[in-house]
Image: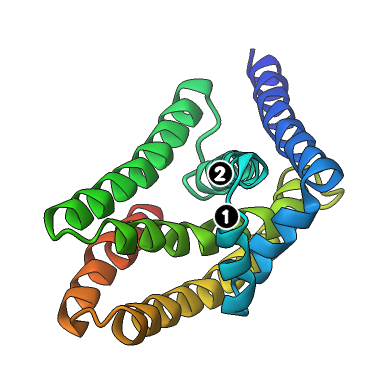
């Protein structure tokens, strides 16, 4: 029975990784022009501005595909760190991650509507998810290695993922702070509250769950 369960659970991970790479193949094969603009927006705002200006059915599909890749890869990383391998736990983690991002979007849009800053809230959602989507895309080969590498050195790949995540998190905080304060004149106090409540606190809670 344990051997059967191990094989069955490995099949679940294999299916999730296969779906992730299938989505990447679709992204690179059909929408790479727009996807490249999205990912390059992490490093230069002119690319993200161009992506936003070209808003159409293709950019919407890019947003959907990158969001699905992000959710799947984040789920695979989280279940590995939490040492969960049953289907119910994987489903709970996937649902929790999806609910977190959906809740973050709803809160930002509600705040934008409350303060009559709808356009600002739309941009806040975009830039907030931009770094997460980019991270989800970049860690795809590392996720594959974590689960199916020939040798058991998954801890090295996990440390690499955490290193990349830390860099992108710092970039995200710097970007949101700079754009919010300089481009839209938002109070630095409110930006600080947003970063603490919706960006940093969930990560700290997850780290606490993993290590304690």
Out of 173 and 201, give the one closest to the viewer.
Answer: 173
Mark 2 residue element: helix
Discs 1, 2 touching: Cβ within 8 Å: yes
Q: Residue furthest top?
A: 1
Residue at image point 72% right, 36% down: 17
Q: CA distance from mark 1 to mark 2?
A: 6 Å
* Residue 159 at x, y percent in the picture: 61, 67
Q: Residues within 10 Å of mark 2 (few under 14, many from 20)?
A: many
Residue denoted by label 1: 133
Q: Quadrant of the C terminus?
A: bottom left
**Could you say which disc has been placed on residue 29 in the image?**
none
Neighbour tally class for label 1: few under 14, some 14-19, many 20 plus, Cα within 10 Å: many
Say which of 139 and 11 sits in front: 139
Residue 107 x, y percent position in the rendering: 23, 50
**Residue 141 versus residue 1 in the image, above or below:** below
Instruction: Using the image, determine if residue 113 lies above or below residue 13.
Output: below
Q: Nearer the viewer, residue 151 or 161?
A: 161
The percent position of residue 69, horizontal first and vertical second, equals 63, 43
Viewer can see residue 172: yes
Tell me: 7 left or right of 53.
Answer: right
Q: Secondary structure at mark 1?
A: helix
Horizontal and vertical percent position of residue 27? 76, 44
Query: Could you say which quadrant of the image residue 3 lies in?
Result: top right
Residue visible at 57% across and 77% down? 45
Kindly identify the residue that appears in the image at 46 percent across and 79 percent down.
170
Instruction: From the viewer's perspective, tell me whether residue 128 is left or right of residue 23.
Output: left
Write down the residue under mark 2: 67
The residue at 18%/81% (across/down) is 187
With respect to residue 110, does 194 lie above or below? below
**Quarter of the image with the N terminus in it:** top right
Residue 142 shows up from this direction: no
């Amino acid at each position: 029975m344990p051997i059967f369960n191990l094989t069955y659970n490995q099949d679940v991970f294999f299916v999730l990784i296969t779906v992730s790479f299938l989505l990447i193949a679709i992204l690179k094969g059909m929408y790479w022009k727009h996807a490249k603009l999205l990912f390059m927006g992490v490093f230069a705002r002119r690319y993200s501005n161009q992506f936003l200006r070209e808003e159409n059915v293709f950019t919407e599909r890019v947003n959907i595909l990158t969001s699905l890749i992000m959710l799947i890869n984040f789920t695979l990383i989280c279940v590995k760190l939490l040492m969960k391998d049953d289907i119910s736990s994987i489903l709970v983690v996937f649902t929790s991650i999806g609910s977190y991002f959906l809740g973050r979007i709803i809160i930002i849009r509600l705040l934008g509507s409350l303060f009559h800053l709808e356009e600002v809230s739309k941009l806040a959602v975009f830039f907030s998810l931009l770094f997460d989507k980019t991270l989800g895309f970049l860690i795809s080969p590392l996720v594959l290695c974590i689960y199916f590498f020939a040798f058991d050195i998954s801890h090295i790949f996990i440390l690499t993922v955490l290193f990349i995540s830390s860099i992108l998190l710092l970039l995200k905080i710097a970007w949101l702070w700079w754009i919010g304060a300089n481009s839209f004149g938002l109070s630095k106090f409110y930006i600080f509250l947003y970063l603490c409540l919706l960006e940093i606190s969930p990560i700290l809670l997850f780290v606490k769950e993993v290590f304690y």
